[in-house]
Amino acid sequence: MSTPFATVLETLTRQRGVRASLVVSERDGVIVEASVRFGQDGDRIAALAASMYRKARLSARAARLGAVSFLQLDAERGRICAAGGGGDLVIVVVADPQANVGLIRMELLKALEGLPS
Amino acid sequence: MTTTNNDDVRRWSDELARDPSSLVFLQLGEALRRQGQLEVALKIALRGLERHQRHVAAHDLVARIAVDRRDFSRAFVEWELVLRIDPNHVGAMKGLGYLCFHQGRLDEAEQYLNKAAAGGAANDVKNALRMVRRTSDGATLSMVEAAASPAPPALPANPVNDPQYLFVDQLLDEAQTALLLDANGYVLAGVYLDADGKNVSADIGAQLSGISDEVRRSTRHLDIGEWKAITFETHATVVAMAPVAPDNLIVLAASRATPLGLMRRLLDKCSAFAADWLARTHRDGASE
């Protein structure tokens, strides 16, 4: 069964270096829709990325910095980008360290427009 | 007096509107700076500088406004440009002497003030020079500032080597701020001021330090190695954080308009600076 997010995720997954792209629920960390490369554990990515995004959002709010709209984590062997539009749904991308993060960010922010707020 | 100043400001503004290439921007910018309208003064000065790129007084004006805005890096660059155009410019030497003293670079401060004194500067510079030489005996920044600074108003007396001001020289403008936190989220260095100028470093540090635990957990479970940086954007701010060995955290915040690539470079720069500072502090502590 295909959800309205399938096209959005396909566009993201087509970017060079992208290993997985998912729409997840920030509240409970479960997958709403996912496009993952072979070998990637979608459930694990969804749970951890949602938790990290939630923590950043709550911390930023507590620090009176405003609502988080985009997050990027750089690690030695990978990158995680996440974007949320204020509702429960967050779009998450896992990519190689060499991936063009500028392009991914742009696509993520564009994809956000398709999410219900 | 105020009426006269306001009349002058109006007259100069009108003149500049009629003739944008007029040098009257120098008087207008200086008047606005003295009135404390620093953002407007800076705009006027920068617009003037676009048309008169090698005008010494224009660079000097931008530098003095930058000092008032506590944008010391910008002031440094502008006064260095002044000296490139006019190597004998006493005002730039005084300004650079003041900035070097402010950053604890006493040898360089002395060199600049020496040159200013040799270039015919008044007694105030000679007094400042004497104070720099006596700094280790307790001369304070405000004493040197009073004697050497070409921009006396609006500067707080920042103690040299105060950890609060550790990153002043690494950041590009006053809207950027950096904090170095320990493993418990306590502030080691840097300062975070809110829009009202209130120091909220402890709050921000405590709130944001928790993110690093979550990040560590995620990278471990996803097997993507050690984390290097995390950046997030809110509607008004960009925040970037990175681990600083052994278990400290640097937090950098800037306006949303700051490009993410620039944020990343500033973060790397501040991280390296913080690591050096921590190592130096540790060494000094061990040797005592």
Image (tube, rainbow, N blue to C red):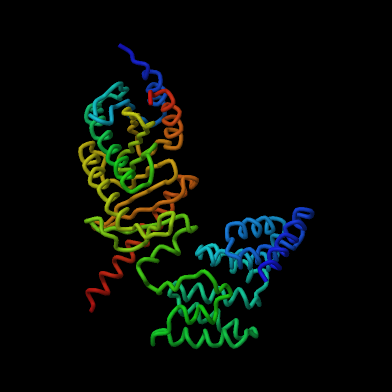
Residue A16 versus residue A32 in the image, above or below:
below
Q: Quadrant of residue B205?
A: bottom left
Give the residue drawn at x 44%, y 49%.
B263
Q: How many marks?
A: 0
Q: Quadrant of residue B166?
A: bottom left
In this image, B78 relative to A44: left or right? Answer: right
Q: Position of residue B92 (x, y in %)?
A: 60, 73
Evaluate whether residue B219 shows in this view: yes
In this image, B78 relative to B271: left or right? Answer: right
Residue furthest right as drawn: B18
Residue B286 versus residue B7 in the image, above or below:
below
Q: Position of residue A29 (x, y in %)?
A: 24, 29
Q: Position of residue B202 (x, y in %)?
A: 30, 58
Give the residue drawn at x 61%, y 57%.
B40
Residue B17 versus residue A11 in the image, above or below:
below
Q: Quadrant of residue B244?
A: bottom left
Evaluate whether residue A20 shows in this view: no
Which quadrant, please, contains the C terminus of chain A?
A: top left
Q: Nearer the viewer, residue B175 or A99?
A: B175
Q: Position of residue B8 (x, y in %)?
A: 72, 65
In this image, B224 relative to B88: left or right? Answer: left
Which quadrant, please, contains the N terminus of chain A?
A: top left
Give the residue drawn at x 28%, y 37%.
A54
